[in-house]
Image (tube, coloured by chain):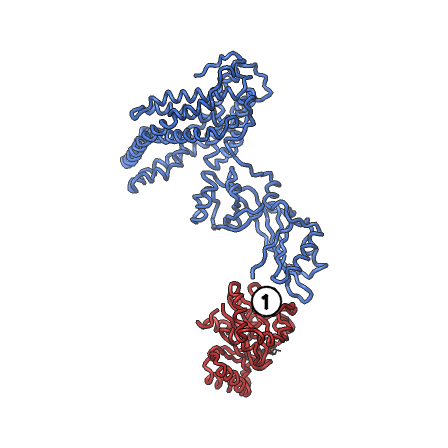
């Protein structure tokens, strides 16, 4: 009963149904032409999950991606106007599928193509249909010029021999079984190549790489990623561009202090200042993003009766965000911004002839291992002082130290034997996420109180805010005991022994240059 | 899966016209349909532009089923497949005669196609033979075209008599009027009278129509080239009547 789905043949441009007419009797039917707009995020979340999302005549279609072709359709949704985030879609299947692919990312059009489809019937001598030909012709955008010309020979049951004969004929005319699918072609034509996006790219480091070269590479990679986020910030497509931009700046800043004396002191200081200034320009916007993203979560914490009271606050945040976005954009467009970025670039360019500094020529491996080990020991010392009654500030200090250790292990992951540290990293991650929760709860309380300070709004808002603050306070206290547990695990003797085994360096290793570099 | 046969002792009464057009209507109604052309003359196959089936070994039920399967041809109309006729079918009688369960062999062969089809429709040659006995025992229902003439009463009685003699369930026989001409007084009289003696008579009447005869020119089912003519409408109505009967619903 069912048709065998035969392979799609890619034909040389010009080999259409007309070409078959000499040999076969072929009924050329009306072709149907559709303009498809393909959507994806900056991180190509849809593409890399093996799917395609396109809209056509007001309907969004989510389908599998099969070698660059739209495959099986999973769900569709009619829409008036454009959808940006997964939660702007209405149908449950669409939301569920897209949530994982998109996360907090926004959809933007990636490429447009015209897909012309036609099914012709091929008949034998007595006029019996023996196979159907499914043509698919793809052009870029609304152009006429054919980018891809393909045909699928679908034999009718019992006429497989005829289909084989026809395929052989098409092969003679230059047909190929595989080739780039329409999506690959369309994307290449419009210079949009899907690339895996990560804030933790490999830097190509070796243990013996001189420290300055190694740190320089880390900085340059981070700088490149930061620059890549800028168009997204300018178009305000989603909140993650700014988030990543800030992470990159922060990472550059911290690598300069984590591995000390790799660049001349005054240059390091100057760069840290510039990076700090650049990040500060965006502080408020990021804060507002965080509040607004947490809107649903906040509201769920409160009993329904109190929720409307908070709408006013979120409306304020939303309005302020509008202003803040414009401010940040004008900053990023300003001449001074390009100048500062230019200075950073120049400073870390491999061509820049900085004079040597105490650590610049040291092999990065041993140098970094020593930093890691010292940092770990420092954390152990601080950790012993953490108890149930520790101040928020003490916890905050521990969090900062852990973050520095995490950065070090992350930047130089290529140098670290993976098997030996996965367990250590897991413990560190757990501790960090507890510390993060604690910190978030603390910062959120403070900012809600600040908002109250400034606004002194009506009493119902006060009620809502008060409710939230006490929930957050409670949450913070709950996390405390979890932190203690995580600290205990991360600092116990076994973990310490592992850190020592992996990272402790014999004194001799770094003595080629006077060991001036003192650790803080 | 239901098995429907188009059968009459007489030739030229509209069996093949029924098979071809009912098959088309069934697939229009969304039923996956297989038309089995059992008449060595192959008229049904001709209407679908099919060459006769390739020869295959017919030693036993298994080889029969396999041979039939190999000869399935997809018609030009998605959802409707055909097994064309084969002159070899003339030997079917002798062949079936040599088999165990000689009267019930066809049913078990056709069971084989259960997963793929909702309906199997058989276009039968006239006369009563061992093959037709097999057809009777294989079918869930036997549609009998009856031209409203004086002779038709006798023919129908011969058939019901045979069913009684062979202890076949007579209610399987569902006659209907074929090539009926309203303008003929005789036709009208017989059409009023005959069904009273046969409770299984279907209500739908297929009118005599030149459009039907043109099937041979078009070589396709009537509703495919003349979807709205009276006869095409009648074939669809017949299909609907069949589908509406709980016992017949494929
Ligand atoms: N309803 C009808 N009106 C006019 N001619 C018909 C009708 N049904 C069948 N015929 C014609 O009568 C002849 C015999 O019909 P057919 O279906 O081949 O009968 P059978 O299969 O019973 O031998 C064919 O030429 C056919 O075109
Ligand atoms: Mg016939």
Q: Is residue A457 visible?
A: no
Q: Nearer the viewer, residue A409 or A341?
A: A409
- Residue B188 in the figure: left or right of residue A138: left
Q: Quadrant of ligand 2?
A: bottom right
Compared with A320, A518 (above or below) is above
Q: Which chain is blue?
A: A
Image-quadrant location for residue A397: top left
Q: Is residue B38 above or below residue A425?
A: below
Secondary structure type for disc 1: helix
Residue A228 in sight: yes
Q: Chain of mark 1?
A: B
In percent of width and height, residue A268 lies at 50, 18
Residue under label 1: B63
* Observer-nearest of B85 and A35: B85
Q: Nearer the viewer, residue B110 or A306?
A: B110
Q: Quadrant of residue B22?
A: bottom right
Front position in the image: A403 or A414: A414
Q: Position of residue A184 (x, y in %)?
A: 60, 43
Callout 1: 10 Å neighbours few (<14), some, many (20+)?
some
Residue A336, horizontal then vertical, whole percent: 52, 24
Q: Colour of chain B?
A: red
Q: Please say if A231 is above or below B139.
A: above
Q: In x, y percent, where is residue A225? A: 53, 30
């Amino acid at each position: 009963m069912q048709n065998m789905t035969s392979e799609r043949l890619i034909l040389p441009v010009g080999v259409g149904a007309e070409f078959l007419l000499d040999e076969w009797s072929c009924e050329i039917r009306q072709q149907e032409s559709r303009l498809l707009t393909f959507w994806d995020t900056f991180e190509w979340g849809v593409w890399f999950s093996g799917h395609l999302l396109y809209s056509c005549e007001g309907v969004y279609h989510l389908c599998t991606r099969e070698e660059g072709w739209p495959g099986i359709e999973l769900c569709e949704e009619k829409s008036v106007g454009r959808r940006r985030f997964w939660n702007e879609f209405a149908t449950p299947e669409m939301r569920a599928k897209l949530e994982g692919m998109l996360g907090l990312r926004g959809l933007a059009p990636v490429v447009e193509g015209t897909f012309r489809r036609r099914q012709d019937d091929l008949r034998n001598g007595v006029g019996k249909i023996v196979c159907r030909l499914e043509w698919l012709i793809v052009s870029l955008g609304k152009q006429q010029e054919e980018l891809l010309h393909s045909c699928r020979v679908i034999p009718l049951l019992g006429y497989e021999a005829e289909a084989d004969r026809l395929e052989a004929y098409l092969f003679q005319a230059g047909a190929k079984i595989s080739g780039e699918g329409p999506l690959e072609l369309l994307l290449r034509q419009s210079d949009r190549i899907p690339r895996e996006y990560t804030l933790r790219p490999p830097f190509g480091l070796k243990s013996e790489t001189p420290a300055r070269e190694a740190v320089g590479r880390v900085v340059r990679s981070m700088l490149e990623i930061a620059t890549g986020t800028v168009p997204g910030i300018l178009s305000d497509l989603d909140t993650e561009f700014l988030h990543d931009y800030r992470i990159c700046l922060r990472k550059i800043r911290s690598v300069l202090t984590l591995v000390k004396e790799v660049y001349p002191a005054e240059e390091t200081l100057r760069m840290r200042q510039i990076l700090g200034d650049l990040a500060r320009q965006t502080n408020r916007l990021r804060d507002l993003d965080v509040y607004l993203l947490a809107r649903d979560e906040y509201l769920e914490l409160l009993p329904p009766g109190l929720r409307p009271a908070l709408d006013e606050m979120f409306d304020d945040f939303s309005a302020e965000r509008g202003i803040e976005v414009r401010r940040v954009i004008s900053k990023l467009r300003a001449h001074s911004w390009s100048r500062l970025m230019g200075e950073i670039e120049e400073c870390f360019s491999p061509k820049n002839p900085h004079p040597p500094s105490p650590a610049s020529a040291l092999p990065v491996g041993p140098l970094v291992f020593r930093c890691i080990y010292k940092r770990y020991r420092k954390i152990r010392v601080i950790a012993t002082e953490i108890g149930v009654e520790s101040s928020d500030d003490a916890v905050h200090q521990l969090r900062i130290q852990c973050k520095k250790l995490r950065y070090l292990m992350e930047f130089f992951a290529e140098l670290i034997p993976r098997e030996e540290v996965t367990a250590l990293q897991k413990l560190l991650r757990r501790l960090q996420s507890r510390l993060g929760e604690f910190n978030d709860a603390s910062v959120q309380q403070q900012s809600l109180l600040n908002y109250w300070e400034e606004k002194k709004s009506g009493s119902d808002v006060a009620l809502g805010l008060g409710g939230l603050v006490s929930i957050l306070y409670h949450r913070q206290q709950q996390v405390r005991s979890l932190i203690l547990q995580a600290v205990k695990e991360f600092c116990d003797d076994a973990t310490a022994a592992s850190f020592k085994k992996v990272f402790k360096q014999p004194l001799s290793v770094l003595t080629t240059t006077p060991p001036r570099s003192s650790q803080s | 899966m239901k098995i429907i046969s188009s059968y009459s002792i007489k030739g030229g009464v509209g069996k093949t016209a029924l098979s071809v057009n009912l098959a088309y209507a069934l697939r229009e109604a969304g039923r996956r349909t297989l038309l089995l052309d059992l008449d060595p003359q192959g008229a049904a196959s001709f209407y679908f532009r099919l060459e006769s089936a390739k020869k295959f070994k017919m030693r036993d039920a298994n080889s029969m089923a396999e041979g039939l399967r190999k000869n399935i041809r997809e018609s030009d109309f998605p959802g409707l497949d055909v097994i064309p006729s084969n002159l070899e079918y003339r030997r079917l009688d002798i062949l079936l005669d040599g088999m165990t369960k000689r009267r019930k062999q066809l049913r078990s062969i056709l069971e084989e196609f259960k997963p793929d089809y909702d309906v199997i429709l058989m276009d039968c040659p006239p006369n009563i033979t061992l093959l037709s006995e097999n057809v009777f025992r294989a079918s869930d229902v036997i549609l009998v075209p009856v031209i409203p003439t004086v002779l038709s009463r006798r023919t129908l009685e011969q058939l019901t008599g045979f069913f009684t003699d062979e202890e076949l369930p007579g209610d399987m026989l569902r006659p209907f009027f074929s090539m009926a001409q309203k303008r003929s007084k005789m036709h009208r009289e017989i059409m009023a009278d005959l069904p009273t003696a046969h409770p299984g008579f279907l209500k739908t009447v297929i009118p005599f129509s030149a459009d039907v005869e043109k099937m041979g020119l078009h070589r396709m089912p009537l509703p495919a080239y003349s979807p709205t003519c009276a006869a095409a409408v009648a074939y669809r109505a017949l299909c609907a009547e069949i589908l509406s009967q709980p016992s017949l619903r494929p």
